[in-house]
């Protein structure tokens, strides 16, 4: 009985993937994502606290259809911002740093429809993280801290389209945040 139930569930699951609906992202589509991140990947460790959560905006344009039968490819731009504070105690005196990061980059995504109204995708971003740092507190070490550098991310995402123009969006990966939640608008 258990084997029969497992076989039935696998069959239903496989059937839903083989009969996936039409693509929700196609060549010529233009989509804007706006998100707020949870779990920053940039400023972590002892003494750090987030002052502005990771926020992001991205634009994607569909450039290619019929990849692996139903898939599509999109490219576009990315903007992200976050701020954090590091505070430490030096023999009773407080010192630390205030950090801001502004990331600008280019993204590419592969979309493959699995479920009706759900745009599932995976992609990569390559960009530049512009970091601003200021020393604060009772103690000054006169150190110059910089950290602007190449930024990259890999992500898995999904957009559930409530109607043809508005979707809820989630991305999981390594970038400005581990989890990015937001909305998407099809232009």
Image (cartoon, rainbow, N blue to C red):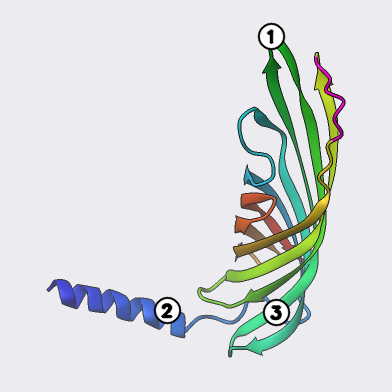
Q: Nearer the viewer, residue 43 or 156?
A: 43
Residue drawn at the location 68% of the way across and 40% of the way down? 43
Alpha-carbon span between mark 3 and mark 1? 56 Å
- Locate residue 168, reporting x and y percent: 62, 57
Main SS, magenta region, reads loop
**In front: mark 1 or mark 2?**
1
State how many labels appear: 3
Mark 2 near mark 3, Cβ–Cβ under 8 Å?
no
Write down the residue under mark 3.
73
Determine whether the residue tagged by mark 2 lies in a helix, strand or loop: helix
- Residue 60 belongs to the span the image colors magenta: no
Residue 121 numbered tag: none
- Locate residue 174, reporting x and y percent: 63, 56
Write down the residue under mark 2.
16
- Residue 143 belongs to the span the image colors magenta: yes
Q: Quadrant of the N terminus?
A: bottom left
Write down the residue under mark 1.
92
- Locate residue 13, reporting x and y percent: 37, 76
Q: Nearer the viewer, residue 43 or 177?
A: 43
Residue drawn at the location 58% of the way across and 78% of the way down? 112
Mark 1 near mark 2, Cβ–Cβ under 8 Å?
no
- Locate residue 91, reporting x and y percent: 68, 11
N-term mark: 3 or 1: 3
Q: Nearer the viewer, residue 152 or 114?
A: 152
Q: Quadrant of the C terminus?
A: bottom right
Determine whether the residue tagged by mark 3 lies in a helix, strand or loop: strand
Residue drawn at the location 71% of the way across and 28% of the way down? 86
Q: Which residues are magenta?
A: 139-144
Residue drawn at the location 87% of the way across and 34% of the way down? 144
């Amino acid at each position: 009985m258990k084997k029969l139930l497992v076989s039935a569930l696998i069959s239903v699951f496989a059937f839903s993937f083989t009969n996936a609906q039409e693509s929700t992202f196609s060549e010529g589509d233009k989509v804007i994502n706006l998100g707020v991140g949870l779990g920053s990947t940039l400023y972590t460790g002892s003494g750090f606290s987030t002052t502005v959560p990771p926020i992001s905006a991205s634009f994607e344009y569909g450039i290619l259809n019929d990849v692996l039968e139903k898939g599509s490819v999109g490219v576009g731009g990315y903007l992200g911002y976050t701020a954090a504070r590091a505070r430490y105690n030096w023999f009773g005196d407080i010192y630390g740093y205030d950090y801001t990061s502004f990331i600008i980059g280019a993204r590419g995504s592969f979309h493959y429809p699995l479920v009706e109204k759900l745009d599932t995708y995976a992609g990569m971003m390559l960009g530049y993280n512009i970091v601003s740092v200021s020393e604060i507190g009772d103690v000054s070490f006169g150190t110059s801290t910089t950290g602007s550098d190449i930024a990259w991310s890999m992500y898995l995402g999904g957009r559930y389209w409530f109607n043809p123009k508005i979707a809820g969006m989630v991305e999981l990966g390594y970038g400005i945040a581990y989890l990015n939640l937001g909305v998407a608008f099809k232009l």
